[in-house]
């Protein structure tokens, strides 16, 4: 961890034994304090270990406000780690009816333009997959479908059943093969709250996880990418802790920083896009030389334009970020 330093007015000055005793007591107090606050001390993987980085966003609602800064932070992870995956947990758009209710826009042309920009930005950032949120499922004629088809990445929703030509049925899951040979299974789950979506029905999320339990046995890490809210994420963790490794969620606009560990499942969510800050969730999975998942940690980077916030998982000297406690905003 490096050498400890102390302010002059705290430095022990009564001999070597007192110095060691003071250092030991201080270290114990510091470690206990960090443990109580939920902070996990990051360390570098050993030579026989391999790390996978999962970057995630949720509830952007047409708001990638600082795309250049976001791209820079994502690029730093890609420069340092061989296996970096970028996911979105839904509601990267705003359905047209919500815009009309808030007098934000009164015509479909503006909706189409904003969605084109959003999909283009997500393509440029290099997303690997996104789960559909209720704002995407609340489609507008064929406009939503046609613009989603412009994405360079697939959309997930294992519990989504489509019986209309106005919307494409999403994929249930994806399996990514990492550079180190690990297989990462990602299952998408969608929640309700959409309107004007004739021809779209949702199956029960718990039943959907059970029906895809084979993904646990066929992968080295099983991840749920959900847009159902943190309370339902917790219910799934309680029910399927023996199957699920990580849940990356959205919909409840919850900031989990650090992520919550529940029944052995790491639950992550990175706030929302309704203010001037940008949120980028970071999860690091560490595997041993037999591809067993032995450690999972996470954090949320919070920044504005040209902010020098960095991650504790990067080899960069920079001020530490301010960790914030879990809080939930209004469900959108």
Image (cartoon, rainbow, N blue to C red):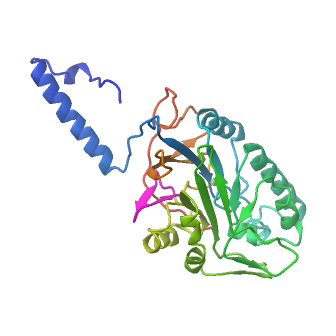
Q: Which quadrant of the view contains residue 141?
A: bottom right
Q: Position of residue 271 (x, y in %)?
A: 56, 55
The total of numbered circles placed on residues is 0
Of 120 and 106, the residue lying toward us: 120
The quadrant the C terminus occupies is bottom right
Question: Residue at coordinates 67% horizontally, 72% vertically from top-left?
Answer: 158
**Is residue 262 shown in magenta?**
yes
Q: Position of residue 262 (x, y in %)?
A: 41, 63
Q: Is residue 321 left or right of residue 153?
A: left
Q: Magenta segment range?
A: 255-268
Of 323 and 259, the residue lying toward us: 259
Q: Can residue 283 be seen from the camera position used here? A: yes
Query: Residue most toward the front?
Result: 290
Of 57 and 195, the residue lying toward us: 57
Question: Residue at coordinates 19% horizontally, 32% vertically from top-left?
Answer: 24
Above or below, comparing residue 275 to residue 71 in the picture? below
Above or below, comparing residue 219 to residue 68 in the picture? below
Q: Position of residue 195 (x, y in %)?
A: 74, 78
Above or below, comparing residue 101 to residue 284 in the picture? below
Q: Can residue 248 be seen from the camera position used here? A: no
Q: Is residue 141 left or right of residue 16?
A: right
**Is residue 296 shown in magenta?**
no
Question: Residue at coordinates 50% horizontally, 38% vertically from top-left?
Answer: 313
Of 261 and 34, the residue lying toward us: 261
Q: Is residue 324 left or right of residue 28?
A: right
Q: Is residue 266 left or right of residue 33?
A: right
Q: Position of residue 228 (x, y in %)?
A: 59, 70
Above or below, comparing residue 124 to residue 1 in the picture? below
Question: Residue at coordinates 78% horizontally, 72% vertically from top-left?
Answer: 169
The quadrant the N terminus occupies is top left
């Amino acid at each position: 961890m490096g050498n400890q330093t102390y302010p002059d007015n705290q430095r022990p000055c009564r001999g070597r034994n007192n110095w060691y005793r003071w250092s030991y007591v201080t270290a114990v107090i510091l470690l206990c304090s960090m443990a109580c606050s939920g902070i996990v001390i990051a360390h570098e993987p050993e030579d026989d270990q391999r790390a996978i980085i999962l970057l995630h966003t949720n509830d952007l609602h047409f708001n990638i406000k600082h795309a250049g800064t976001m791209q820079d932070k994502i690029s730093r992870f890609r420069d340092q780690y061989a296996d970096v995956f970028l996911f979105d947990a839904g509601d990267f758009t705003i359905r047209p009816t919500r815009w009309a209710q808030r007098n934000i826009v009164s015509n479909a042309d503006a909706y189409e333009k904003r969605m084109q920009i959003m999909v283009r930005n997500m393509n440029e950032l290099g997303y690997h997959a996104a789960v559909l949120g209720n704002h995407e499922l609340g489609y507008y004629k064929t406009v939503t479908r046609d613009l989603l088809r412009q994405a360079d990445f697939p959309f997930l929703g294992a519990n989504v059943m489509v019986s209309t030509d106005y919307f494409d049925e999403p994929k249930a899951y994806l399996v990514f093969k990492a550079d180190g040979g690990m297989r990462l299974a990602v299952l998408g789950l969608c929640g309700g709250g959409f309107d004007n979506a004739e021809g779209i029905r949702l199956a029960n999320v718990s039943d959907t996880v059970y029906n895809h339990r084979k993904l646990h046995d066929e992968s080295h890490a099983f991840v749920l990418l959900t847009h159902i809210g943190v309370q339902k994420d917790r219910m799934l963790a309680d029910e399927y802790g023996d199957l699920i490794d990580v849940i990356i969620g959205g919909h409840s606009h919850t900031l989990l920083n650090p992520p919550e560990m529940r029944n052995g499942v790491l639950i992550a969510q990175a706030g929302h896009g309704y203010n001037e800050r940008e949120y980028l969730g970071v999860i690091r999975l560490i595997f041993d030389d037999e591809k067993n998942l032995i450690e999972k940690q996470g954090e949320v980077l919070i920044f504005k334009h040209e902010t020098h916030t960095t991650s504790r998982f990067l080899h960069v000297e920079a001020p530490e970020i301010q960790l914030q406690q879990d809080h939930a905003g209004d469900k959108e």
